Image (tube, grey):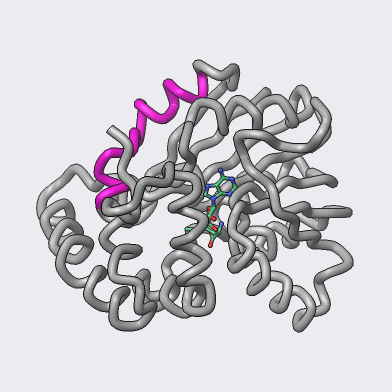
């Protein structure tokens, strides 16, 4: 079943996801750090560390949004990072941030769809995604195109929400995600659906071994899953 942000609209998931992120783009960074109490920053840092040994020079950050994962990936000392996203609103916020931080010469943000990447095969040393894959309209297609543009021997590192399995984290997390987060999200972003879509989309998204199965199906090998903070999020790694 596909969960969409605006159940009362007829557009497909991709259009709705782009519209939703356009709507919340001006509050996205603030809400992200507030709702996760800043833990999202630690998760991205941990994910980037998994590429330390590989020293990738050309990195693609899929569903880059406002570019936070791309900024973390600068710790790897790459020559260039290209970030792509389907939401112009998120990219505009990201571009402002890159300019302000004087990073626009190294981080290049572009409009682009993970399911139809406009890059040649085997181009990137690493392909990274944080909190993006859950929003793909067609997960398999998106992951397959990431595999296509990755160089043989290159790695993908993906961070995504997962579902804690153990008491009491499972219960506490469900309560927070279902009742608290949507209220704060609605109040600040003024979009009444975006932060209801978040827990709903996590609920139906394949996590853990199920996600590794999809990675393997599209060709990734040596796949690994590393749960973070009681399994609230997970890092997935795969090699081409
Ligand atoms: C939750 S944000 C994550 C942004 C950023 N990676 C971060 O960690 O803050 C998800 C992003 O995925 C983008 N997105 C969803 N589907 C996409 C697709 N098919 N191709 C590219 N970007 C996509 C959305 O527009 C949105 O900006």
Examine the rendered structure and indicate whether residue 200 appears above or below residue 70.
above
Look at the image and tell me in which quarter the C terminus lies. top right
- What secondary structure is the magenta-colored segment mainly? helix
* In magenta stretch: residue 206: yes
Residue shown at the point (47%, 79%) measured from the top left:
30
Examine the rendered structure and indicate whether residue 227 appears above or below residue 210.
below
Q: Say how many tags the image has.
A: 0
Look at the image and tell me in which quarter the N terminus lies. top left
Spot occupied by residue 9 in the image (x, y as percentages of width and height): 34, 52
The answer to which image quadrant residue 157 occupies is: top right
Q: Which residues are magenta?
A: 200-216
* Closer to us: 97 or 93: 93
Residue shown at the point (65%, 29%) measured from the top left:
145
Spot occupied by residue 126 in the image (x, y as percentages of width and height): 72, 40
Give the left or right position of residue 118, taking residue 9 as reference.
Answer: right
Give the left or right position of residue 175, taking residue 107 as reference.
Answer: left
Residue shown at the point (80%, 26%) measured from the top left:
121
Give the left or right position of residue 3, taking residue 96 as reference.
Answer: left
* Closer to us: 66 or 23: 23
Give the left or right position of residue 40, taking residue 183 as reference.
Answer: right
Spot occupied by residue 153 in the image (x, y as percentages of width and height): 75, 25
Examine the rendered structure and indicate whether residue 187 appears above or below residue 117.
below
Residue shown at the point (43%, 42%) measured from the top left:
12
Examine the rendered structure and indicate whether residue 180 appears above or below residue 17.
below
* In magenta stretch: residue 87: no
């Amino acid at each position: 079943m596909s969960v969409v942000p605006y159940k009362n609209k007829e557009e497909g998931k991709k259009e709705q996801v782009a519209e939703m992120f356009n709507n919340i783009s001006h509050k996205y960074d603030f809400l992200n750090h507030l709702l996760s109490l800043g833990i999202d920053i630690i998760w991205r840092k941990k994910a980037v560390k998994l590429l330390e040994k590989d020293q990738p020079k050309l990195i693609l950050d899929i569903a880059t949004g406002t570019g936070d994962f791309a900024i973390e990936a600068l710790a790897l000392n790459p020559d260039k990072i290209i970030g792509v996203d389907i939401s112009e609103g998120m990219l505009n916020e990201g571009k402002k941030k890159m300019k302000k931080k004087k990073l626009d010469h190294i981080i290049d943000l572009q409009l682009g769809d993970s399911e139809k990447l406009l890059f040649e095969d085997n181009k990137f040393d690493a392909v990274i995604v944080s909190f993006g894959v859950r929003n793909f309209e067609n997960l398999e297609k998106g992951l397959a195109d990431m595999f296509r543009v990755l160089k043989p021997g290159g790695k993908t590192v993906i961070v995504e929400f997962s579902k804690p399995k153990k008491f009491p984290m499972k219960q506490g997390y469900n309560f927070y995600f279902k009742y608290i987060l949507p209220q704060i999200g609605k109040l600040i972003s003024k979009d009444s659906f975006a932060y209801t879509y978040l827990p709903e989309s996590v609920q139906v998204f394949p996590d853990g071994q199920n996600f590794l199965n999809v990675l393997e199906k599209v060709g990734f090998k040596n796949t690994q899953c590393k749960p973070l903070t009681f399994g609230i999020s997970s890092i997935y790694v795969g090699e081409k």
